[in-house]
Image (cartoon, helix red, strand yellow):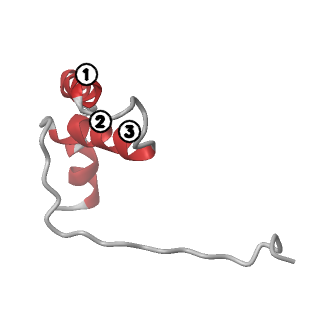
Amino acid sequence: MDLNEMITSIQPLDEAAMAKARERQAQLAKPPGSLGRLEDFSVQLAGITGKIHNRIEKKHLLVFAADNGVVA
């Protein structure tokens, strides 16, 4: 697949799946918004895949650090 084909294959987010993902987040036994950005990510992932229950098979953890002078 070339770049142009890849670009034209990009679809808008599935708003219905995102709404269902938000509803599911509201039903979970946790304070609303307590998972922060992770909740936003789950809703966005539902919009991308069109599915509420997604499984991420290959997990990676990236750690970034910088010396911005705050410690000094």
The answer to the question of whether label 3 and label 1 lie on touching residues, with beta carbons closer than 8 A, is no
**Residue farthest toward the right in the current orientation of the protein:** 72
C-alpha span from label 2 to label 3: 5 Å
Query: Horizontal placement of 43 versus 63: left or right?
Result: left
Q: Is residue 14 visible?
A: no
Amino acid type shown at disc 3:
Asp
Amino acid type shown at disc 1:
Ala
Vertical placement of 56 versus 49: above or below?
below
Query: Horizontal placement of 22 versus 69: left or right?
Result: left
Vertical placement of 70 versus 31: above or below?
below
The answer to the question of whether label 2 and label 3 lie on touching residues, with beta carbons closer than 8 A, is yes
Q: Position of residue 60 (x, y in %)?
A: 30, 72
Badge 3 or badge 1: first in the primary sequence: 1
Which residue position holds label 3?
40
Badge 1 or badge 2: first in the primary sequence: 1
Which residue position holds label 1?
19
Q: Residues within 10 Å of mark 1 (few under 14, many from 20)?
A: some
Q: Is residue 18 visible?
A: yes
C-alpha span from label 1 to label 2: 8 Å
Amino acid type shown at disc 2:
Val
The answer to the question of whether label 1 and label 2 lie on touching residues, with beta carbons closer than 8 A, is no
Q: Secondary structure at mark 1?
A: helix
Vertical placement of 37 versus 70: above or below?
above
Q: Secondary structure at mark 3?
A: helix
Q: Position of residue 58 (x, y in %)?
A: 18, 69
